[in-house]
Image: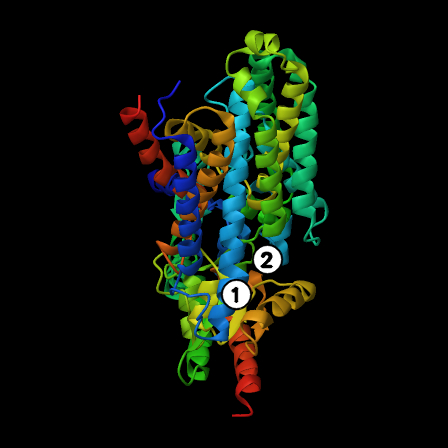
Amino acid sequence: MMRLWLALLCLLAWVPAARAEARVLALTPAACEMLYAIGAGPEIVGASEHCDYPSAARRLPRVADYRRLFVEPALRLKPTLAVTGAADLAGLASLRAAGVRVMLVHPVSVRDVLDAMQALGEATGHAAGAGRAVAAMRRRLARIAAAATGPPMPVFYEDWSQPLLTEGGSSFITDALARIGARNVFGAMPMETLRTSVEEVVRARPQAIIVPGATPAMLAKRRAFWRRWLPGVPVLSVDANLMQRPGPRLVDGMAELQRRLQQADGHVHAPR
Amino acid sequence: MYMRLARPAFALTGLLVLTLVLLAVAASSGAGWINPWHPGDATSAAIYWQLRLPRVLTAFAVGGLLAVAGAWFQVMLQNPLAEPYILGVAGSAASGAVAASAVFPASAWAMPAGAFAGASLGIAVVGLFASLGPARLLLAGVVLAAFWAAVLALLLTLLPARALGRAFGWMLGDIASSPLSPTLLLAALAVSVLAGLWLSVSLDRLLLGEMQARALGVPIRRLHLGLLLGASAMTAVAVTAAGTIGFVGLVVPHLVRMLIGPMHRWLIPGAALAGGALLVVADTAARTVVAPAELPVGVLTALLGVPVFLFLLVHRR
């Protein structure tokens, strides 16, 4: 009888522990993609406005935009973990005060992206899934590294045209560019993003200009603009959702950009 | 109010020479010194004539417009703290720019046109209160500025983030991507200086107070309305060109009064030169001190202008 009671007691103690799985708020699109990639998708209970991949993410309740967290609807979802990209996101303090664990994921290199996925795996009980996803990314990165032959190609990465904004040395994009065989011409600046001028770009002599997320019309405009200053330098685009999100699809963006740069490079240097 | 430093004509000539030298040095400065007559290669020549010189002239014209507008607002509102943005014109311009760029995201002209339309609306609304007299007009303006700030905040919250990127860039203040040509801006500055000279006697009389000015035959109501519309239009042009740039319109008129006295036939051209020169120096510093990165120019107008202003404030009482 005593044994039965003990067994029952153990069962009662165990059941809630087993059922108390993580309830996660994914507060950046990259965090959202990472969580799905490691198999923690079912545990996401709320997301930020721009979480749109994979398609299941579109159906998540929205509890934040890029500037702030909507505290009440977020707490109503009874989260246990919030994954954010910005430590100063308005409303995070209230979340912490309510006992929610806040994880800051702000990669400044490709390696950080892999580490963040592993850390998320451990925090959500999906370490094995994270290990598999990270291993797959490592294989892609190895293939990308093998394809990056020759001296690095100097490139200008145009985040914004008016004012002219680009990425600096503490951005994961500078590292991603280095891994595909390109060199960010402003990669030596310590900032994450910086404002610069046409004159400085011209002086930096890039051999390609990358305009992430450009529509064909926008790309045509930027080509016409840069042709005046850097004639013969190819202006090309890359899917911003792949390249600008430090998540599992970053390797897709890197591979796509590497291919386009190599095509452009072959085109430019073919007569030589 | 102030002791002047030197004879006005002498000081103004000095200011003119200094400004011309600064313009020439600023246009040649950058990642490498470019001599416009011997640029070395075609790229350097293009950089000088198509990038640096237009930018320096734009900065000069915008700084001059803001300083002259500030001087007008200060005498009209009879308040030394008046500045071009005090009546809410910048807020209404920014609201117009944000709204227009969200509605017409593909049009290059949507933002400047929206900024100008918004500024005109702001001016029209504030113009309704022109007859209230300086004190109440100032109050109305400050309240309207708060109203426009709320409209702007509402737009920024409700409109989709994608539509706002351009507007954010513009609101940072960016002389390099002004949609208005430097020639147009310089013409606007010239018109504002000539108008200021034409009105200078009336403006001097207004310094004595409204009663005295009226006794001396100044048509106060018409003058007020003219100053309000004129100064607001200058502000609108400056804001459309380069976004909101603080400090120049508030402090440069005081600076010039300290240097050459309060008489408007000297003050107005002096403010145009000094405002233009300050913004040229600030913008040149903005694009060179952390090169190849750039700083927002508004940061530097205050960093450079405040020490000069405080020095003069202490030493020229």
For disc 2, the neighbor class at 10 Å (few under 14, some 14 to 19, many from 20) is some
Disc 2 to disc 1, C-alpha distance: 10 Å
Residue drawn at 49 percent across, 65 percent down: B47
- Amino acid type of the residue tagged 2 in the rendering: Tyr
Q: Is B41 or B296 nearer to us in this picture?
A: B41
Instruction: Name the chain under label 1.
Output: A
For label 1, the residue is A249
Instruction: Name the chain under label 2.
Output: A
**Where is residue B155 shown, x and y percent of the image?**
64, 36
Looking at the rendered structure, the secondary structure element under dot 2 is loop
- Amino acid type of the residue tagged 1 in the rendering: Arg
Residue A228 seen from this side: yes
Residue drawn at 46 percent across, 22 percent down: B81
For label 2, the residue is A53
Place residue B77 in its image quadrant: top right
Q: Is residue B233 above or below residue A178?
A: above
**Where is residue B232 shown, x and y percent of the image?**
62, 30
